[in-house]
Image (spheres, rainbow, N blue to C red):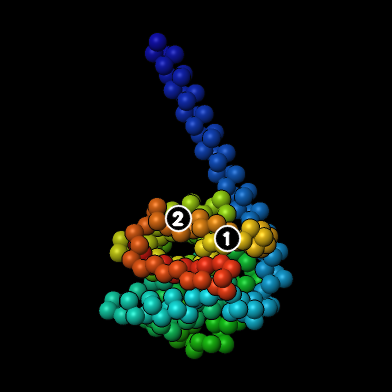
Amino acid sequence: MGVCGAGGLKSFFLTGLFFLITEYLLKNIELAERKAELNGYYRLHAPIYDLTRWTFLFGRNKLVRVLTSNLSGKPPKTILDVGCGTGKNVIALKRAFPDAQVVGCDLSDAMLARAQAAVKHSLNPREMSKIELINASILTLKDRQFDLIVCSYMLSMTGDSLEPILHNIRRRLNPKGKLAVVDFNFSALSMFRRWMRVNHVSLDGSVLRALALCAKVERQELHQAFGIWNWFLWIGR
């Protein structure tokens, strides 16, 4: 019985280890495929991103203004911008919170190159010394914690990875840290939803539902855009 029990325990342990390793490898393969897909997409879009996105990525400036007002009493010392793109929010957040260390992460080499150029052009050397731009996903980011994490129009592009990404974002928040999100929410027009899906965007309300399940909301706004879709601004912890 003792030998049989030990053998069974060993078999159970090895089976569990096998599944853990398999899951780890599959996640890394999925991440590599996602990174390659995003790099291909944004290699084409990076040169025109800032010229075009102001026409439909609403609320980004408002989010920074709201954060500046809400956090004026105790400004964040460490900020993470997830999916920082061309660096628009990184620069705005640095100007709003001049003493903060601001980290921007993105999976697109082309977008990060634009962000580096924008930061160099817009900020002075002292400000730049407290900016860090890295090629990483929140899923692979080293264990660091932040007072404020900002997600601007990126959660709606995460697909099936939405829940693990939100889980990892919560892990990166300091105990009293805040999460701030502006993003697409929903469109009743199926044709428009399909078109946005081609551009890697989900317009099915899933992001707001996921936030409601994993975090405590402090401020939430819904806004209509041309009567075609709505977007939201959300701050919580």
**Residue 179 pos. (x, y %):** 40, 65
Q: Is residue 111 above or below residue 21?
A: below
Element under label 1?
Answer: loop
**Residue 156 pos. (x, y %):** 55, 61
Foreground of the two, 107 or 208? 208
Residue furthest top in the image = 1
Taking the spot 45% from the left edge, 54% from the top edge, the residue there is 210
Q: Which residue has dot 2 on it?
A: 209
Taking the spot 55% from the left edge, 44% from the top edge, the residue there is 24
Q: Which residue has dot 1 on it?
A: 188
> Which quadrant would residue 130 be assigned to in this image?
bottom left
For badge 2, the amino acid type reads Arg
Q: Is residue 99 left or right of residue 27?
A: left
Element under label 2?
Answer: helix
How far apart are the alpha carbons under marks 1 and 2?
16 Å
For badge 1, the amino acid type reads Ala
Foreground of the two, 83 or 32? 83
**Which tag, 1 or 2, sits closer to the chain's start?**
1
Q: Is residue 25 above or below residue 215?
A: above
Q: Is residue 106 left or right of residue 61?
A: right
**Residue 50 pos. (x, y %):** 62, 79
Mark 1 vs mark 2, foreground winner is 1
> Which quadrant would residue 97 be assigned to in this image?
bottom left
Query: Does any portion of residue 73 appear in the rendered image?
Result: yes
